[in-house]
């Protein structure tokens, strides 16, 4: 079986659209739309140079007009925090008292008990059972701040 040019363009478009699933940013999808333009030109009997020109123009138009729409409606651009980054700004419960000399203690969040260190140098340490706010994570240690009583 011999493939016609328009079939090759459609195959390229499908391959690019499938690859878009693995690469964020809607760039390969714009190239896939351009390849569909090349397929349309080939099906109308255009020469290969015109097919490439139509592909380039369709890709550029998709990149300029469709990509911003797709990013606005389908992709926020900001990634959801995962792993330990998702713990930042959450509250944890003090499970072991903080040592006044080292500032180290233990806090529990989401069922996990973490080594913790106080970020602020408050004279009063949070008692066991009180809540603290996670400021950042350094290695396997939560850096926490006491939550002021209101």
Image (cartoon, rainbow, N blue to C red):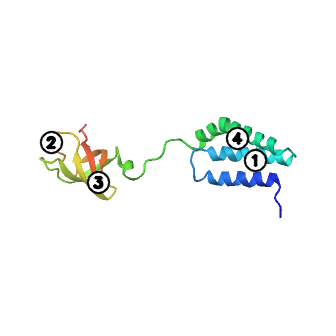
Quadrant, the C terminus: top left
Q: CA distance from mark 3 to mark 1?
A: 50 Å
For the point 67% across and 43% down, which residue is it?
30
- Disc 4 versus disc 3: nearer the observer: 4
Looking at the picture, tell me which residue is in the foreground, 135 or 51: 51
Q: Is residue 5 above or below residue 62?
A: below
Query: How many residues crowd around disc 4 within 10 Å: few (fewer than 14), some, or many (20 or more)?
Result: many
Query: How many residues crowd around disc 3 within 10 Å: few (fewer than 14), some, or many (20 or more)?
Result: few
Asked if labels 2 and 4 touch by Cβ distance under 8 angstroms, the answer is no
In the current view of this chain or complex, which residue is farthest to the right? 45
Q: Secondary structure at mark 3?
A: loop
**Dot 3 or dot 1, earlier in sequence:** 1
Q: Is residue 48 left or right of residue 71?
A: right
Looking at the picture, tell me which residue is in the foreground, 144 or 51: 51
Quadrant, the N terminus: bottom right
In the current view of this chain or complex, which residue is farthest to the left? 101
- Disc 1 versus disc 2: nearer the observer: 1
**Dot 3 or dot 2, earlier in sequence:** 2
Quadrant position of residue 7: bottom right
- Disc 3 versus disc 2: nearer the observer: 3
- Residue 114 rendering spot, x and y as whole percentages: 27, 55
Asked if labels 1 and 4 touch by Cβ distance under 8 angstroms, the answer is no
- Residue 129 rendering spot, x and y as whole percentages: 22, 52
Q: Secondary structure at mark 4?
A: helix
Residue designated by label 3: 140
Asked if labels 2 and 1 touch by Cβ distance under 8 angstroms, the answer is no
Q: Is residue 68 left or right of residue 47?
A: left
Q: Secondary structure at mark 1?
A: helix
- Residue 39 rendering spot, x and y as whole percentages: 79, 48
**Dot 4 or dot 1, earlier in sequence:** 1
Residue designated by label 4: 59
């Amino acid at each position: 079986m011999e493939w016609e040019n328009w079939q090759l363009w459609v195959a390229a478009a499908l391959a690019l659209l499938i690859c878009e699933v693995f690469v964020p940013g809607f760039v390969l999808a714009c190239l896939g739309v351009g390849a569909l333009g090349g397929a349309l030109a080939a099906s109308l009997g255009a020469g290969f140079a015109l097919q490439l020109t139509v592909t380039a123009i369709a890709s550029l138009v998709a990149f300029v007009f469709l990509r911003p729409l797709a990013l606005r409606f389908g992709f926020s651009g900001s990634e959801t925090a995962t792993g330990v980054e998702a713990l930042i700004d959450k509250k944890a419960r003090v499970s072991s008292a903080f040592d006044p000399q080292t500032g180290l203690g233990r806090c529990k969040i989401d069922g996990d008990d973490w080594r913790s260190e106080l970020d602020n140098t408050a004279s009063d340490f949070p008692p066991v059972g009180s809540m603290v706010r996670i400021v950042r994570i350094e290695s396997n240690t939560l850096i926490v701040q006491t939550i002021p009583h209101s």
